Image: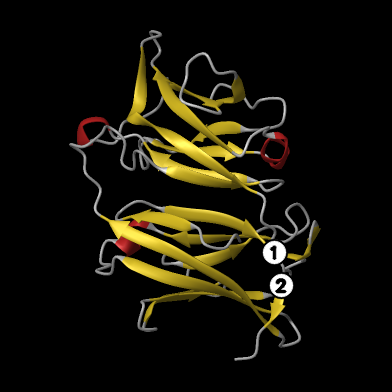
Amino acid sequence: MPNSVSYTLFKGVDFEQIWNWEKSPNVPQDLTDWTIIVQVRDSAGNTLLACSSDSPIDGPHVQILDQTLNEGFYKFIIPGEASLGYTWRVGEFDVYFEDPNGGSYLDKAEALIVTRETSSNKACFVDARRTFTVRRHVSFEQVLTYRPGGQDLDLTGFTIYMQVRERDDSDAPVLLQISSAAPNANGSVIEFNADQVANPGQFTIIISPQDAADYPAERGVFDLVIEDAAGKRGLIGKDGWRIVIDDVVTVLEDYTP
């Protein structure tokens, strides 16, 4: 996980962030039978949130991904309903790792989570004007919800397109293109939640490790365009979106409680 990165958590919106752990550059650590702990604290050191890979999945928890297919990868998840009661605004968090033999390690994240209420009258998207951090060689996933007029919209029959350019200029070349119609050549895709009745408007932007590695710039801007069955198009998030490409590799360091 990169240092000095800020993550924005919107109250009532599912927060999911995938990271990986490397014991040395480009050498992932197999996390089978490991325990991962996330602790969020305020500036005084008081614990605001603590969860682990052993925590119940209906609350904040860490999910260790299939290590055969995704060695070293894990996901930090805060369900939207769990964040509704948060009264704090900013917290620093660290990630701790415990191996099967009892050894402990610390990833000094020094990152921030900022919580705030969503506003349906500010934009048609629940969390517009966001900047996403994409790590090279690492799969990126971001769950979002389309909410025009404050109402989650069933995406059945719709298509969402994403085009990434290095700068906010329609003449700038397209560096990455993704849609919900089909995965691109490297497997990047926009996936709609399969149950649009229970989760209307929910979709996931997935950038494959190959596209993350091959992206030819350090940052980018992009629009999300939604198209209905009749071919009518509109923008999701009127102020656009941004990504930052992070080349930092997390290296394990010893930790003594």
Q: Residue furthest top?
A: 230
Q: Looking at the image, is 89 positioned above or below residue 14?
A: below
Which secondary structure lies at badge 2? loop
Q: Looking at the image, is 97 positioned above or below residue 117?
A: below
Q: Residue furthest bottom?
A: 257
Q: Tell me which amino acid carries mark 1.
A: Trp
Residue 118 x/y as whole percent: 25, 48
Q: Quadrant of residue 112?
A: bottom left
Task: Write down the residue under mark 1.
Answer: 21
Which secondary structure lies at badge 1? loop
Task: Write down the residue under mark 2.
Answer: 252
Q: Tell me which amino acid carries mark 2.
A: Leu
Q: Residue at x 33, y 31 (%)?
A: 239
The C terminus is located in which quarter? bottom right
In the figure, is residue 5 to the left or right of 27?
A: left
The residue closer to the viewer here, 131 or 72, is 131
Residue 201 x/y as whole percent: 36, 35
Residue 93 visible in the displayed image: yes
Residue 58 x/y as whole percent: 42, 64
In the figure, is residue 10 to the left or right of 3?
A: left
